[in-house]
Image (tube, rainbow, N blue to C red):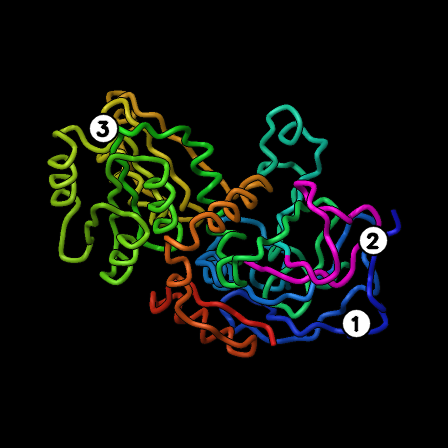
Amino acid sequence: MTGTAPNLAELPEFSRAAVVRRFGEPVKIECVPIPRAPEPGAVIVRTTACSICGTDVHLSRGNLSLTVDLPIILGHEMVGRVVAIGAGAERDSVGQKLAIGDRILWTHTACGQCFFCTVARQPTLCENRRAYMYENIEKPPYLLGGFSEYGYVLPQSGRVRVPDNLDDAVASLCSCAFRSVMNAFDNLGPIDPSEHVAIQGAGPLGILAAAVARVAGARTVSVIGAPAPRLALAQEFGATHVFTIEGTTHADRATELRALTDGRGPDIVMEFTGHPDAFGEGLDLVRKGGRYLTVGQLGGGTTTFSPSTIVKKNIRVIGSFSGDVKSYWKALQFASAHIDTIPFGKMITGRFALADVNTALERMRRLEEIKPLIVMT
């Protein structure tokens, strides 16, 4: 196959993009080169929108325990329209045809050849993984971040066409926050209708997890977090109970959760907070023999807990990192199926131009936004 493209000469020479050159400094809008044509297996897109993740805030401030090859283009929850298709890239990763103008989400890369890709079948742990937002913009193909007018989809990246009934804002949610939730539920395993689920964190991941747990049939879904408007939104997404951390102690919340669960504690506790101290609290909350799943701990913080708690309570502790192309597809399918009954759009609390990215990041840091959206014009 030869690939398809419009007149590539019509593509601009540069893409405006939000660039981090030094941690802790304001993000700057710079002009980054656009490759003249996609290599075999690659795709060039015109980015339409990219929502902001808490990880974007942490990365820009240098607070992530992951390798970042500065300077980088910030942003990794992007959706874009295909403008050029490399040879052999005429279908997405689930076999759907791709054409110029189609909207897609795309994944971090997996080599398909290392131990984790082949034997372990855990491509998120790929030894040769390349991740958007972490790659140096001064090396080809340059456009490996979301807050950019154009983006480059690497040949080793999965890509999934966006269903027509999802707008750009909801699609962008599926490209990081929601795919991480879907991967977490795959790692967790089935939820029995008799089981009580507690979710630590009322941010985007925790709210989305409430929806998935409820649809999966959990007997109750409790969300623990703050502030009050986020807890109210969690209820709209399916939470049956909410517990504020404002003006309460862990002991207060544990007492109420045990009263709700016949004195045992939740069968499943899921952590989406990013606060290290939440780990010890989660171990205390989950019932004996229960499952504790942690997703939010990507920062460099530490905490102290008693390992004997895991042993004496016979707890299964599960970590879940990122998500592969299956997770993106499942997130899009879930959103498409439930778009009329779950208010996904309410999670997008502000829309900003690319030039206003610093304002949006600061509002996200201050918890004044749940999910701000950078809209390309």
Whether tag 3 and tag 2 are in contact, CB under 8 A, the answer is no
Residue 97 belongs to magenta span: yes
Q: Main secondary structure of the magenta part?
A: loop
Classify mark 2: helix, strand or loop.
Answer: loop
* Distance from Cα at disc 2 to Cα at disc 1: 16 Å
**Which comes sooner in the sequence, label 2 or label 1?**
1
Reading the image, the residue beneath label 1 is 11
Q: Position of residue 88 (x, y in %)?
A: 82, 46
Residue 140 tag number: none
The residue under the point 85% across, 69% down is 7
Q: Amino acid at mark 3?
A: Arg
Residue 112 belongs to magenta span: no
Query: Is the C terminus in the top left, top right, bottom left or bottom right quadrant?
Result: bottom right
Q: Amino acid at mark 1?
A: Leu
| Circle nearer the viewer, 3 or 1 | 1
Relative to 330, is 317 above or below? above
Q: Position of residue 241 (x, y in %)?
A: 20, 46
Classify mark 3: helix, strand or loop.
Answer: loop
Q: Position of residue 236 (x, y in %)?
A: 29, 55
Residue 21: in sight, yes or no? no
Classify mark 1: helix, strand or loop.
Answer: loop
Q: Amino acid at mark 2?
A: Glu
Reading the image, the residue beneath label 2 is 39
The residue under the point 29% across, 53% down is 234
* Distance from Cα at disc 3 to Cα at disc 1: 57 Å
* Camera-nearest residue between 232 and 100: 100
Residue 287 tag number: 3
